[in-house]
């Protein structure tokens, strides 16, 4: 009883300082410190990683990284341009495929499908399972279906279609969450004013859910841009000194280039890999920033 | 309502911006690499190579140099491993396959089933050297069994006298290449019988200088790395002869070339499809590769072929091209 009372008296903030008061039972304090420690471990590891990579890659963090092509002979001046453009190509087409498909699928499931029908539940379970499938399995699928059966080969579009499948469940799930957060009254109001179900979904529900959808999809794409395993299987190449010039072009991506450079024994390549990791992290942070920006700009409280 | 509509279009707008960005990049990329124009002999097209990550440096250097001279040709080199590369090669998905071992019967059968005919070219020799400290006067020759005893996954050997009672009581300090490297895979595969199977309590480093410093800095030190690194550091280290059952053989350019330094030396190959060689860009790339092989091998830190080996490479390639002509 006394424990509950003291918990209720706690302020909203969980900072450890607020727990050091004499009135807090030891058990509560230990628990809160354990929580804080769990958070600290994650943040600390990330900070160490960031600092280590930045320090190591510092000598090569200049424009050459994006203006020059990879080189085996001259790692001092080599860059990651082909990997950067490859990543942008792949992720763009991933977005162009996965976004409309994911949003439409979610819209159907949330707004139009008959709720709690067996078929619907079957699909839901499947989507959730798909989200948990290891990415390498998508690589195997992409290799068999897109690269070989559809004869698209080791191309940008093969990679994009595979990564699109990979992030599709995440996009569907986050879009559904966003749609579900739109109050029932918005739909009812629209329907009551004579709008059809389609008009309601397209003009009211979907726009209202944009902040959530944007956040979810950009985070999903952030995952896709960092993927290496399925692309290794799909045949992203290790050495390429030209930018992709079409969806059927050969390509490599930044994670693959980093992976390849870290395997080289010469120190110059290690530094180059570190610099490319920083570049990849910058792109990831920028994407996350865009997600937050869109959310903040368009967020609505009901 | 209008404002909500705006939100939806902002998402669409974001997509459009992304597309525009790509198209701009595409335009830039296209500008840098105009397909098949502007080079001396007018060759254009693409050459796709995949396969062993050990042979990868050779092919990547060849690709880089060749493209500098022939900007119209696009050469890509992958490193999926010898086996993974052969799977693609025998499906006709790549033009050539880098290999650190000869093609297996099953792989050759796949090639045949898909109508891919090929020839193999020996490019260079990969050799590894087991090194000890300069002041180590006992370990001049180790058997492969002794090496396996030292490096086995669960090995607890920590003193030289555990390897051979006649060795002195000297603690063993182990150094080796990083576990991602091809050298590590090769050594563990040959010595421990399975790639990647190794004790883990050694000092790994991707930087061979660390291994040199480590072994030269401790009397009981033992390590292994590529032969060419040893050649550069003969003053600081002592190479151990290897006995694989046929007597002790010291590592040297000659013993590696003639194959007597076994099992720690091996030839490196590239398998080229004759179907691909019918394309002028592939033929001219491999002509370049063969002509400059000695220099490429040296730059990639492998042992270049002997004079005879070079002559054989040239004649093998000419034979292969003759096959292309008759088809």
Image: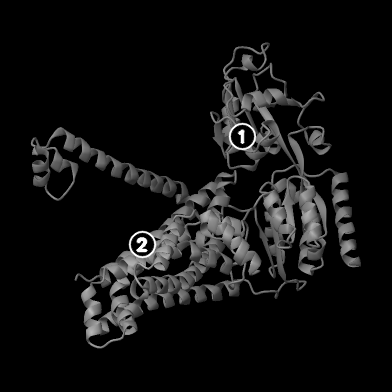
Q: Quadrant of residue A152?
A: bottom right
Chain letter for mark 2, please. Answer: A
- In the figure, A103 relative to B62: above or below? below
A155 vs B310, nearest the viewer:
A155
Q: In terms of secondary structure, where does tag 1 sit?
A: loop
- Residue A171, quarter of picture: bottom left
Q: In x, y percent, where is residue B196?
A: 61, 37
Q: How is the image coloured?
A: one colour
Name the residue: 59% across, 64% down.
Answer: A251
Read off the residue under disc 1.
B197
Report which quarter residue B308 is drawn in: top right
The quadrant of the picture occupied by the N terminus of chain B is bottom left
**How far across and down, in percent of the image, does residue B53 sit?**
66, 48
Crowding at mark 2 (Cα within 10 Å: few <14, some 14-19, many 20+): some
Looking at the picture, tell me which residue is in the foreground, B156 or A183.
A183
Can you say which quadrant of the picture contains the C terminus of chain B?
Answer: bottom right
Q: Is residue A301 above or below residue B157?
A: below
- What residue sits 67% from the left and 59% below the top? B64
Q: Which residue is located at x 56 percent, y 37 percent?
A: B205
Q: Could you confirm whether marks 1 and 2 are on the same chain?
A: no
Which label was assigned to residue A288?
A: 2
Chain of the residue displaying label 1: B
| The one of A62 and A192 positioned closer to us in this rendering | A192
Marks 1 and 2, how far apart at CA: 40 Å
Work out whether residue B143 can be spotted.
yes
Q: Nearer the viewer, mark 1 or mark 2?
A: 1
Q: Is residue A154 visible?
A: no
Residue lying at 12% horizontally and 43% vertically, measured from the top left: A7
Question: Does residue B208 sit above or below B155 in this rendering?
Answer: below
């Amino acid at each position: 009883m006394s424990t509950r009372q003291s918990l209720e008296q706690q302020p909203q903030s969980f900072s450890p300082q607020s727990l050091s008061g004499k009135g807090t039972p030891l058990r509560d304090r230990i628990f809160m410190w354990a929580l804080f420690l769990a958070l600290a471990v994650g943040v600390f590891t990330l900070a160490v990683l960031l600092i280590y990579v930045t320090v190591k890659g510092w000598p090569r963090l200049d424009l050459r990284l994006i203006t020059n092509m990879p080189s085996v002979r001259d790692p001092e001046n080599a860059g990651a341009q082909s990997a950067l453009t490859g990543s942008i190509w792949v992720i763009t087409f991933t977005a162009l495929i996965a976004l409309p498909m994911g949003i439409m699928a979610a819209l159907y499931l949330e707004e139009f499908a008959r709720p709690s029908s067996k078929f619907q539940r079957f699909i839901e379970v499947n989507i959730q399972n798909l989200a948990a499938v290891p990415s390498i399995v998508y690589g195997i699928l992409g290799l068999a279906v897109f690269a070989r059966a559809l004869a698209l080969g080791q191309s940008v579009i093969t990679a994009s279609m595979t990564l699109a499948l990979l992030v599709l469940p995440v996009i569907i799930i986050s879009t559904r969450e966003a749609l579900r957060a739109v109050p029932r009254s918005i739909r009812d109001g629209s329907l009551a004013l004579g709008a059809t179900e389609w008009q309601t979904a397209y003009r009211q529900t979907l726009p209202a859910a944009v902040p959530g959808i944007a956040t979810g999809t950009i985070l999903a794409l952030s995952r896709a841009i960092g993927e290496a395993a399925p692309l290794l299987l799909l045949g992203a190449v290790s050495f390429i000194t030209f930018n992709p010039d079409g969806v059927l072009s050969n390509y490599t991506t930044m994670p693959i280039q980093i992976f390849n450079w870290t395997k080289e024994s010469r120190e110059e390549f290690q530094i180059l890999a570190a610099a490319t990791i920083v570049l990849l992290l910058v792109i990831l942070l920028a994407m996350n920033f865009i997600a937050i920006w869109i959310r903040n700009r368009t967020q609505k409280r009901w | 309502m209008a404002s909500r509509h705006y939100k939806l279009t902002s998402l669409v707008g974001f997509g459009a911006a992304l597309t525009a960005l790509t198209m701009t990049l595409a335009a830039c990329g296209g500008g840098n690499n105009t397909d098949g124009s502007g080079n001396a002999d007018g060759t254009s097209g693409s050459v796709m190579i995949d396969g062993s990550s050990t042979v990868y440096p050779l092919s990547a250097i060849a690709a880089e140099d060749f493209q500098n001279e022939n900007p119209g040709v696009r050469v890509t080199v992958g490193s999926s491993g010898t086996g993974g590369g052969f799977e693609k090669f025998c499906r006709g998905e790549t033009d050539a396959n880098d290999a650190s071992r000869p093609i297996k019967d099953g792989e050759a059968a796949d090639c045949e089933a898909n109508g891919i005919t090929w020839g193999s070219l020996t490019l260079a020799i990969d050799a590894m050297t087991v090194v000890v400290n300069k002041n180590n006067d006992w370990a001049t020759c180790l058997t492969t069994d002794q090496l396996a005893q030292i490096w086995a996954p669960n090995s607890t050997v920590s003193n030289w006298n555990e390897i051979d009672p006649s060795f002195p009581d000297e603690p063993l300090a182990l150094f080796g290449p990083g576990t991602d490297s091809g050298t590590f895979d090769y050594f563990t595969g040959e010595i421990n019988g399975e790639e990647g199977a190794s004790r883990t309590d050694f000092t790994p480093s991707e930087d061979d200088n660390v291994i040199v410093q480590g072994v030269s800095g401790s009397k009981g030190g033992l390590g292994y790395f590529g032969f060419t690194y040893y050649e550069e550091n003969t003053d600081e280290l002592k190479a151990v002869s290897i006995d694989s059952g046929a007597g002790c053989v010291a590592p040297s350019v000659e013993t590696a070339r003639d194959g007597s330094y076994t099992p720690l030396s091996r030839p490196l190959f590239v398998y080229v499809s004759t179907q691909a060689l019918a394309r002028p860009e592939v033929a001219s790339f491999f002509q370049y590769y063969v002509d400059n092989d000695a220099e490429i091998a040296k730059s990639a830190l492998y042992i270049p072929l002997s004079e005879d080996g070079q002559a054989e490479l040239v004649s093998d390639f000419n034979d292969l091209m003759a096959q292309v002509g008759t088809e």
